Amino acid sequence: MTPQAAARTPYHQGSRTVQDKVGVRDLADHVGRSIGQGIRPVAAAFLELQPLLVLGGADPAGAVWASVLTGEAGFVRATGPRQISVAAAPRAGDPLAAALTREDTPVGTLALDPRTRRRMRLNGRARPTPRGLAIAADQVFSNCPKYLQKRELHEGRRPEEPGEPRRGTRLTDEQRAFVAAADTFFLATVHAHGADASHRGGNPGFVRVPSPYALEWDDFPGNAMFLSLGNLAEDPRAGLLFLDWRTGTTLQLTGTARTLHAADGSRTVRFELTEAVETPHASPWRWSEPEFSPANPGNGD
């Protein structure tokens, strides 16, 4: 399948395999009609209000990572019916920095607004620009607000500058505690013709850390497209991003992930760590404590 054909087809075989296993192919076909290549005016207006953008892709060695880019509202904007401009790029020390100095780099992006529980995804090809990045869209679509925790953005940037990234091949006790207390993380995956960035959320404790080298979480019911799990079914490389919404510190993890399907229909994703990068104060923004989503398991719906 050519990249052009992949762009016209919402699902590749990995997603189809998971949809069929779960029994939601018809629903996925219905939901998949929302996937397009164009950026509608309402989506363009949404992008211009966002102070952060999650980016997923592979580094030059092939490891998959998720990163966060930040700026004042308007730093992400549509510059055409199928292109966005981002007035930011991963800083030196970010695992994706080197990859995004190249032309035609496959990326997945996620614009998420905790203030309104809205999110949209744009997957495509990135190239460097004098101000940051330009991304040509292959897929554009919105997601439902399920499992999004509501947060308010405090005024003003934090005074601290980003710290030096700290790398390791195992999670420290502090990092394990941070992950176990998280209510949100971001997941980057890849497939033969592109990349994807998605959101995972739940009440604190929904991510389990059984060892310094492994994480796991239950896969909650979503939109039935199974883009992320479909990617993992074909290529197990994955990147996770945890953000401390109060301090701006990020924890980026790369490794491999696989989905375990139980007899009762439930699913668990197990992630095996290859490398971790912790960057103090990577984001300048300060967010409020969360108002947990009513869709989170245990909260009622």
Image (cartoon, rainbow, N blue to C red):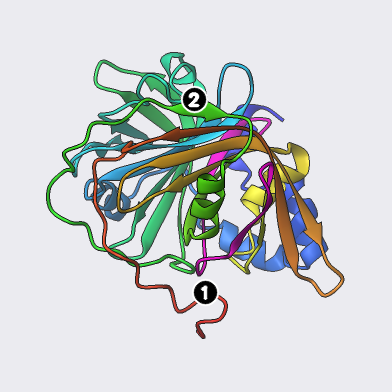
The amino acid sitting under disc 2 is Pro
Q: Which residues are magenta?
A: 190-214
One can see residue 254 in this view: yes
User: Residue tagged by mark 1?
Assistant: 296
Left or right: 122, with 48 as reference point: right
The secondary structure making up most of the magenta span is strand
SS at mark 1 in the image? loop
Q: Residue drawn at (42%, 21%), measured in percent from left and top? A: 93
Q: Hey, what amino acid is under mark 1? A: Asn
Q: Residue furthest bottom?
A: 300
- Distance of label 2 from label 1 (alpha carbons): 31 Å
Q: Which mark is residue 26?
A: none
Give how far across and how far down residue 4 sits, in percent.
Answer: 59, 30
The structure residue drawn at horizontal position 48% and vertical position 25%, both measured from the top left corner, is 96
Residue 32 figure quarter: bottom right
Q: Which residue bears the numbered disc 2?
A: 95
266 sits to left or right of 152: right
